[in-house]
Image (spheres, rainbow, N blue to C red):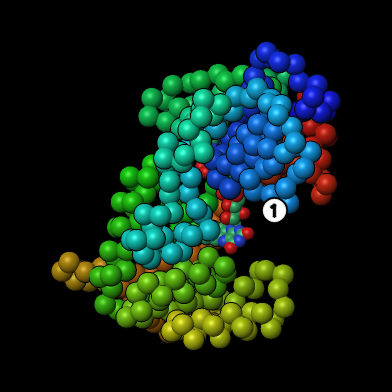
Amino acid sequence: MHGNGLSSILPGRKPYKVLVVGGSYAGLSTTLNLLDLCHGKPTRFSLAASPDLRASNERIPVQITLVDERDGYYHLIGSPLAFASRDYAAKAWTRFQDIPALQTPEVRCVQGRVTSIDCQGKTATILETGTNRQIDEEYDYFVAASGLARNWPSAPQSLTREEYLQETRKHIKYLENAHDKIVVIGGGAVGIEMAAELKLAQPEKDVVLIHSRSKLLSSEPLPDEYRDNVLSLLHDSGVETIMSSRVVNILPTELKGGCAPSTVVELDDGRNIKASYVINAVSRYRPTSSYLPPSAISKDGYVRITPAYDVSTWPLI
Ligand SMILES: Cc1cc2nc3c(=O)[nH]c(=O)nc-3n(C[C@H](O)[C@H](O)[C@H](O)COP(=O)(O)OP(=O)(O)OC[C@H]3O[C@@H](n4cnc5c(N)ncnc54)[C@H](O)[C@@H]3O)c2cc1C
């Protein structure tokens, strides 16, 4: 850690305190890989074993605090299926307390939100979920793995597994009760996946994907051939598409007893689509970096970092 190699670690040294913010892909893999390295083992996520480390019996004392607003690891990439299938939804969120690899005295999981860090004093302020207690957590090393904050339907808005299961069930119930079309707005990655997973999980439903441009994935740097293939795969799966049309209005109509309320989706070309359920899948996200010092953040709120992952332009880092 301090660059002198494993053999230089003095026995009896106080554990290095590592604070990891975010327990998703980046934060969880950092935590577990770090544990492996500190145990003198090759990292579990690397394909190639590291002979140097495997040969070592040295252990580096470490105390990792993993902080996340959620009470568990959520498989974000699976969101489109989690919002279409009850069985899958139950598999996509695992509470940190149920992840065997984290059940070691070297890891402490805190459910809460990091609100600020003091880089000079090496202290982070955590607002603990539930109690609203403010915790001042000291660290030797700080890992910012808080990703992006995403709106529904890209990500569930719940912070506990229990609430998340209710959130997905409520959504799936609407889909199951839909007698008219289910409209997904936005032919980006999230909209395409939502439409396709929905049709896969509930093949009897009429699913329509509306996109304002002539090609799907229009804001991604992809060749047209790829976009055309995606469109044809969507059609093969039974999803109907309406291209080059913009939704201008969504008007609620009558409530049907026990069923999802119907709505009329108005398009800019004058067409109207009667829908039981409308999912706005135009991706909306925002940075989560507000806890970092202003000097570390760009004007758009993203972490200032070079293409070589250099953050040395930050003071005190
Ligand atoms: C529907 C969908 C499908 C996708 N499909 C793919 C794909 O197929 N392939 C691919 O490579 N990428 C895909 N992505 C993108 C991928 O999900 C992200 O790149 C990835 O989630 C980034 O991981 P991360 O760990 O950096 O951050 P995130 O997954 O954003 O996780 C950040 C974590 O930090 C926590 N957090 C945030 N702020 C705080 C705070 N202040 N205090 C405490 N905790 C905090 C959050 O609760 C969250 O658990 C997809 C994204 C979506 C939405």
Near-viewer residue (209 or 128)? 128
Image side of residue 73 versus residue 53, left or right? left
The spot of residue 209 in percent (x, y) is: 47, 77
Pointer 1 local density, CA inside 10 Å: few below 14, some 14–19, many at least 20: few
281 versus 286 height, above or below: below
For label 1, the residue is: 47
Please name the residue shown 61% across and 83% down the image: 229
Q: Is residue 250 above or below residue 124?
A: below
Placement of 16 over or under 295, stated as above or below: above
Name the amino acid, label 1. Answer: Leu
Quarter occupied by the N terminus: top right
Of residues 121 and 281, the one drawn nearer to the viewer in this rendering? 121
The C terminus is located in which quarter? top right
Can residue 87 be seen in the rendering of this structure? Answer: yes
Q: How many marks?
A: 1
Indicate the quadrant where residue 128 lies: top left
Q: Residue at x 55, y 45 (%)?
A: 24
Front one among 43 and 258: 43
